[in-house]
Amino acid sequence: MALEVVGVRILVTGGTGRLGSAVGARLRAAGEEVRVLSRRPGPDVVRGDLRTGRGIDSAVAGMDVVVHCATDYLGREAALARTLVEAARWAGAPHLVYVSIVGVDRVPLGYYRTKRETEELIAASGLPATIQRATQFHGLVRGLLAGASRLPVVPVPRVSFQPVDVRDVANRLADLALAEPAGRAPDFGGPEILTAAELAAAVGEASGRPRRILPVKVPGETFRAYADGGHLTPGHRDGVITFRQYLAGQAGHAS
C-alpha cells in the first residue's frame, strides 16, 4: 500500500552507482525529494562515509526513507549497514529499503554470505524495513562472459542464470520506498532463465564475434549450488527487459 505522505524525503546510499542512480532518477521523476549519500560533493548530495561513519548521522537526519544501494565486495557489507542502522535509530527510524541477492541463503559464496548477514542485521534492528532480493544484473552476466567471448572456443559452466535489468530493479525499489515497510519482499527476477551457453551466444552475436560455445562442468560447492538453481527464482519473473534487449541497448550506446 502506497504511503499517503506528501513530499517524502528519501536518501539513496550508493546513489552514484548504476543501481542507486537509477533509483534516484525514478524517484525524482515521481516528484519525490531525493538526496544521494556520497563522499564527494555534488548536486543533491549529502556528504558522508559509511566506512568511517563520518557525516552519516546528519545525512540520515530528517529522512523518511533510506534506500540502501551501497555495497562492498571486500566483506564489509554488514559493517556499512551497521553504521547506517545506528544512525537511523537516532534519526527517528526512517523506513530502510535494502537490496540483496536471490540465493544468499543457498549459494555458499563469500559475497552472498555478507549480504545474508546484512539482511539479518537489518531484520533484527527494530527499524521499519524492506529487504528486496534480486537476481544477477544483466551487466554482471555480460561482464562475466564478454572476456571469454574473445577466445576461439568459449568455455561456460553448465548452469543457468535469470539476469535482470538494473532499471527494472530500480523501479521496484522506488515503488517499495513509497510503500509501507514489507519486511522480506517477494523475490525479483529477470523475465527469462537461460543457460550460460545461451547467454554467451547472445553476447557473441551482439558483439559481432560469434564463437563456438563449450559447456563444461565446474567442480566445487558453489557451482553445485548454481547448478541446482539456488540463485534462481522461477516463480518471480518480474523484470521486463530481456538480456538480448539489454545487449541491443548497449550496442546502441557504443555506436
Image (cartoon, rainbow, N blue to C red):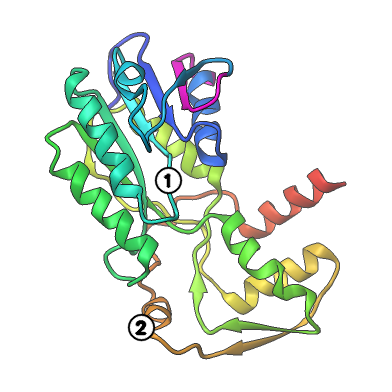
Q: Quadrant of residue 109?
A: bottom left
**In the rendered structure, which segment of residues is drawn in magenta?**
29-41
**For the view shown, which residue lies furthest in the top direction?**
6
Relative height, residue 249 to residue 104 (above, below): above
Q: Regarding mark 2 in the picture, which secondary structure is present there? A: helix
- Label 2 Cα crowd, 10 Å radius (few <14 / some 14-19 / many 20+): few
Q: Which mark is residue 71?
A: 1
Q: Which residue is the site of mark 2?
A: 221
From what the image shows, is residue 248 above or below residue 27? below
Amino acid, disc 1 = Thr
Given residues 134 and 36, the one toward you in this image is: 36
Is residue 115 shown above or below 123? below
Disc 1, SS: loop
Q: Is residue 40 magenta?
A: yes
The image shows residue 32 at horizontal and vertical percentages of 44, 15
Q: Position of residue 181 (x, y in %)?
A: 22, 32
In the picture, the quarter occupied by the N terminus is top left
Residue at screen point 68% across, 53% down: 245
**Taking 128 as reference, is 97 left or right?**
right
Query: Which of the 4 image quadrants contains residue 4?
Result: top left
Asked if the residue under mark 1 is in contact with the one under mark 2, i.e. CB atoms within 8 Å, the reply is: no
> How far across and down, in percent of the image, does residue 46 sit?
45, 18
Instruction: Give me the residue at 27% from left, 45% from top.
Output: 185
The numbered mark at residue 236 is none
Q: Residue at x 27, y 35 (%)?
A: 83
Amino acid under disc 2: Glu
Is residue 92 found inside the magenta-colored segment of the image? no
Q: Is residue 254 left or right of residue 15?
A: right
Residue 230 location, quadrant: bottom left
